[in-house]
Amino acid sequence: MGLIGVATGVLSVLRSGRTVRQWRHVPEVSTSSVDASVLAVVPARNEETTLPRLLPGLVGQPGVRVVVVDDASEDGTAAVARSLGAEVVESAGPAAGWAGKTHAMHLGVASGRDEEWLLFVDADVTCTPDLVGRLVATATELGADLVSSSARGTGPAWWFLLPAFNTLVFEGSPPDGRGATALAVGHCILVRRAAFEAAGGWEAIAGTHADDVGLGTLIRDSGGFVKFVDASALLTTSGIDTFGDCWRSLRKSIQPAFREMFGPWGRPLLVAAGLLHLAYGLVPVLRWRSPWSWLAWFAQAVPHREFLLRTGQPGTAAVLAPLAWATIGVFLLDCALRPGAQWKDRRVG
């Protein structure tokens, strides 16, 4: 256990230092605002209760045309969207070979009128009335073809599970754009239409369930400039506030992503990653009397605190970092050992 403790301490310092440095590549959203021609597409499946929180802040923003794609909803999604001033595109569900959300966003884009920018926003997001103008200003100032931001939320998932998951995301899709994949978050993605069409649009990644990172990577690999920015002060989300909702949401992204990226190796890699992260979190707790364990505990808490402060969460929750990492290990094992994932009553993995 002595050598394991030393290794965990050293790895925690190196890993955490990298995550904190990566946050320096994440600029704040511009304080300026630019009016532009924007098509905002909101994929919506059974979202009659969330749209009244989103649409009042989105409809009426200068230059913005809002289209809600009713993805075979069984509630009053379409009626609510129309009553709040959005246009509605009706869908009977995804076509063969398409993922549900990707197909819905594709239909939304097809209803456009050659707007300069495309904005993809989750239905369970709430935004400030200056969001779109400030995102356009940010993209213009950075010279970016795509900018994306995560939202803020409340609940235990945000101060316990998501800080560790943020490190995993940055390791797979670093915000400097130099990873195997380019970072984008489905909460809110603004992309220049010309770059989107040149890359092949949603048709190019029709079947993916990791549509956000998929689009970011597609744009980057087609020669576009992709930038993850921090606009979380302008965005909130209710979709992953409960621990269970967060677990299911992450699972429906991670499980298919590993399968798409690694094929038959996806499940063994998830098992290995789960066991390693379980040990990564438990060693500082089980060997708490060792100075190396204290070093590991402190180092793991530092990037947690960075995420918590960025997303308006209590910074003191960073002390739970090792337990959060152990939980991430359990999560990855769950993804590996329990096949199949469900989201919005559809199988996605």
Image (spheres, grey):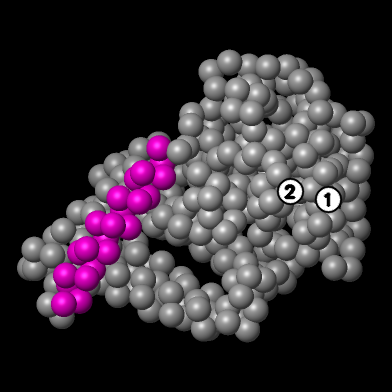
Are the two marked residues, 1 and 2, in contact with CB atoms closer than 8 angstroms? yes
Visible residue check, residue 248: no
Write down the quadrant of residue 148 in the picture.
top right
Q: Residue under label 1, please give it.
A: 200
Quadrant of image for the C terminus: bottom right
User: Which residue is located at x 53 percent, y 75 percent?
Assistant: 335
Q: Tell me the CA gap for discs 1 and 2.
A: 9 Å
Describe the element under mark 2 as helix, strand or loop. Answer: loop
The reply, left or right, for residue 305 in relation to residue 74 is left
Which quarter of the figure has residue 113?
top right
Mark number displayed over residue 156 = none
Q: Kindly identify the residue that appears in the image at 82 percent across and 44 percent down.
A: 198
Number of marks drawn: 2
Q: Which circle, 1 or 2, is nearer the viewer?
A: 2
Residue found at x 40% / y 37%: 24
Q: Is-magenta flag for residue 81?
A: no
- Front one among 53 and 9: 9
Is any atom of residue 112 visible in this view?
yes
Decide which of 278, 59 is in the foreground and name it: 278
In the figure, 251 relative to 111: above or below?
below
Q: Which residue carries the number 2 mark?
A: 222
**Residue 333 location (% of width, % of height):** 46, 78
Q: Quadrant of the N terminus?
A: bottom left
The residue under the point 73% across, 48% down is: 222
Q: Residue 69's spot in the image, x, y percent?
A: 83, 45
Mark 1 residue element: loop
Are there few (<14), some (14-19), or many (20+) residues within 10 Å of tag 1?
Answer: some
Name the residue type under label 2. Answer: Ser
* Span shown in magenta: 3-24
What amino acid type should be assigned to the residue bearing mark 1? Gly
Residue 32 sits above or below residue 29 on the image? above
Q: N-terminal of the two: label 1 or label 2? A: 1
